[in-house]
Image (cartoon, rainbow, N blue to C red):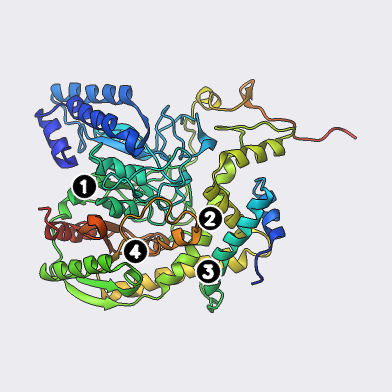
Amino acid sequence: MRNVRDTARDVQNGDASALSVLEESLAQIRRRNEELNVFLHVDEDGARAAANAIDGRIARGENVGALAGVPVALKDNLCQTNIPTTCSSKILEGWRPPYNATVVDRLLAAGAIPVGKTNLDEFAMGSSTENSAFGPTRNPLDTSRVPGGSSGGSAAAVAADMTPLALGSDTGGSIRQPAALCGLIGVKPSYGLVSRYGLIAFASSLDQIGPLTKTVTDAAMALEVIAGHDPLDSTSLPEPSPSLVAHVEDGVAGKRIGVVRELIDGADADVVASVERAVEALKEAGATIIELSVPEFRLGLSAYYLIAPAEASSNLARFDGVRYGLRVDGDDVTSMMEATRTAGFGEEVKRRIMLGTYALSAGYYDAYYGQALKVRTLTIDAFRRAYHQADLLLGATTPSVAFEFGSKTADPMAMYLSDVFTIPSNLSGEPAISVPFGTGEAGLPIGVQLLGPGRSEGQLFAGARVLEIADGRP
Amino acid sequence: MPGLKREDVAHVAKLARLTMSESELDKFTVQLGQVLDHASDMNALDLDGVVATAHPFGLINVVRDDEVRPGLDHDAVMAMAPDAQDGRFAVPRILGEAP
């Protein structure tokens, strides 16, 4: 499958029709979806209608936008009008949203073709896509292993050449970690850069939508389209979408890059070796390398696993059988709600609701939630100090390559610990990108992570592009 | 911080409107206790004077002009309800029988 840039260029120039590009995408989905369980819903008719409309506009000489005819996969926690949206939960089975997420409107306005909804860990809670009520997604590179999560379906869609672009959401690493495990670029933008309107909330102060692609340029193109102020999201930054594609080839000459010990310690040897080789590549491209230690990043995991469940317990209170989705009958309204939630939510979601409810309950609020919000401030301050010394930070995205099914499901804490390198950026609200760099155990891809201060996406894409070239993808 | 007890978990389940079996209560008591133990590294910190963070870039009090705008289509929203009556959400009875 062609990448985003080439597809959009060819479709706009009339060298390929949007419909032919779409049919290629749909054919690949038909070939591999049963085995991989990537898409929960494929909107063939809607996508064909959209592709025909694009082709018609191009025939009339119109410029249809930056993503002309690009098939895109949407994580199934993003609302698209009248298309089933489940969050991979039984509690939303059968629900069809009456509105588009802002990112969906922006993709459509740029000429992209949404083809369907991808599998995730239920309500985006997980790191392997094993928590889906509709079964796990398999890693297209090794079907005995997880694709990562929670945006595992979106990562697998791009890795399996079903679509050249997918959107995911990242609350604690849910775009970057599956990108790393599937050999893709994954971007967690600055908090507020991309509107969260129509993203079904997990932890509202941490959630961000971002792209998964095969190339750095593709990711920059997609982020330019979906970013920018949206009055429908009050946490949206009050500024237009930044220029990003123009910065992809800026390089890193003269940049100071901090290699952070806490973003490497504990990773497997093959992952550490990849980070070390990335350091050499950045040095060769003219960057100055600084070694840093940021001990506060370790505390971030503790803060995250109180803040995210606390917000989730509040956000998921809306699923009560009254307005949408599943209802299980009961004698009175309270027993109906209890029966509905007990039947509708899976085990991991219940675990986090329970944890969050406890952290917010009378007598424990200050000790847990209040303390976690202060530790969040410490993490932000620590980042600020690090950015006095360095322009960007570098570390691993994940402690290991893609792991095997079932290897962490029995021990929730072990699964949580696998997010340790990605969580700090969610707490600080700052952007980070995972870039494939080399391979490790069983020839599987390894992701290295570049982190930057708020609104530094342009610099991150430039750094990522240097690594992409050094890894043999000119 | 005292260890998490089984009756705490049962109480929280009630608050969260979730029914837990006996074995689920046992399991969650252990698993939630592990996460809370891990979080105890925060209790050793002196955080007096540290301000809590809500929005990472300090965006607060976002307001807009008070203009009438169309909302979602009423029929489209109600069509997704598990039960509806006369354009309203219908639920089982809320109040007990009169004494």
Dot 2 or dot 1: first in sequence order is 1
For the residues labelled 1 and 3, the Cα–Cα distance comes to 37 Å
Q: Secondary structure at mark 4?
A: loop
Residue nearest the viewer, comparing A313 with A415: A415
Would you name the residue on which mark 2 appears?
A: A309
Which quarter of the rendered picture does the N terminus of chain A lie within? top left
- Badge 2, how many Cα within 10 Å: few under 14, some, many 20+? many
Residue name at image x 20 percent, y 33 percent: A68
Displayed quadrant of residue A225: top left
Would you name the residue on which mark 4 appears?
A: A399
Q: Is residue A141 left or right of residue A465?
A: right
> Which mark is nearer the camera, 3 or 2?
3
Chain letter for mark 4: A
For the residues labelled 2 and 1, the Cα–Cα distance comes to 32 Å
Q: Which mark is residue B38?
A: 3
For the residues labelled 3 and 2, the Cα–Cα distance comes to 15 Å
Would you name the residue on which mark 1 appears?
A: A214
Check if mark 2 and mark 4 are on a common chain.
yes
- Up-down relation of residue A167 to residue A31 (above or below): below
